Amino acid sequence: MDQKTLIIFLLLIAGAVFLLSQLILVPSFGTRSVESRLIKRRLKNMTEAGRAGEYSLVRKKYLRELSTLERILESLPGTDRVQDLLEQAGKTYPAYRVILAMIGLAIIVGIITWIFTTNIIAAPLAGLFAGFVPYMKLKSDRKKRLDLFEEQLPEALDMMTRALRAGYPFNEAMHYIAEEMEEPIAHEFGITFEEINYGRDVRQAFNYLLMRVPSTNLVAATTAILIQRETGGNLAELLGKISGILRQRFRFQRRVKTITAESRMSAWVLSLLPFFVFLVITLRTPDYVKPLFDTEMGNLILGGGLVLQVIGALWVRKQINFDI
């Protein structure tokens, strides 16, 4: 390893250590982990017309409480998107921690790959892939939480129907769901109940609920509730019908998943088989694949193959996924 490479290597290690210290030590000894999420939600709620001045003051106060690195990360274009994902996934830590984890993991994996391979193409690719792992994990947690919410929604509508037929007002029916059901629907309906109870307009409260839980089924339910409150009618009967429709939709979704199970398994085999074959060849005859790593043309072929493999996997995934 020459002197220039050694300097770059040491700088990367120093950067990784600094990012890890910001990721671990600052949140551990600070008091902003939960407050950040609450303030961000209030900032979003204050973007209504006529409150721009108040929003600006709270935004400045929030940024002053952050460190320099945190302030820079909070100002990045994708931070709001990450914060929305965190709220939809039910996480309480701020967005800059996810961004720090992505950067730190990318640097560390890139350094480790460089140490073992000294390959100028493999190291950045490995670091880039590793950097997206926290983001993909966050999206996976978000999907699991939204799927669980949608599974709970028909039962919640049935509970609301029973409460309305028993003579409870609409607000108390919302509170009944928040008290009796499990997370995440209890938490989200509890927030909506508190917002309505403290004077927020019902339409606006449900709009914020849809921002936190972007669900097609919830859109149908909230639209029906809002229209009924304006036009009148039997809300309990309407919610009962919506609940029945949602249950039929879930049954149809499960049937489609059963029918496409073989196709999804084939997609996994097609996506993973090239990597498995490459690993077996590398272990049995290392000299056979050595030119892919040691020559410039081999690096280009390897990189092109990975890109085409990713494109093929995405295309196959699109073919077997159905929006119902």
Image (tube, rainbow, N blue to C red):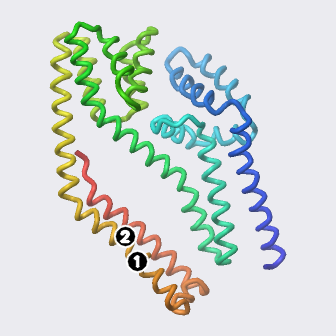
Give the quadrant of the C terminus.
top left
The quadrant where residue 317 appears: bottom left
Which residue is depicted at the point 17% across and 50% down? 255
Direction from residue 248 to residue 131 in the image, left or right: right
Q: Is 313 rendered above or below residue 15?
A: below
Residue 209 position within the rendered picture, expressed as x and y whole percent measured from the top left: 40, 26
Q: Nearer the viewer, residue 54 or 164?
A: 164
Residue designated by label 1: 274
Determine the secondary structure under disc 1.
Answer: helix
Which residue is depicted at the point 49% across and 19% down? 48
Residue type at the position of mark 1: Pro
Mark 2 surroundings within 10 Å by alpha-carbon count, few (fewer than 14), some (14 through 19), many (20 or more): some
Residue 312 position within the rendered picture, expressed as x and y whole percent measured from the top left: 36, 68
Give the quadrant of the N terminus.
bottom right
Q: Nearer the viewer, residue 295 or 34?
A: 34
The quadrant where residue 169 appears: top left
Q: Is 175 rendered above or below residue 100?
A: above
Residue designated by label 2: 271
Which residue is depicted at the point 28% across and 26% down? 156
Q: Do the residues labelled 1 and 2 touch (CB within 8 Å)?
A: yes
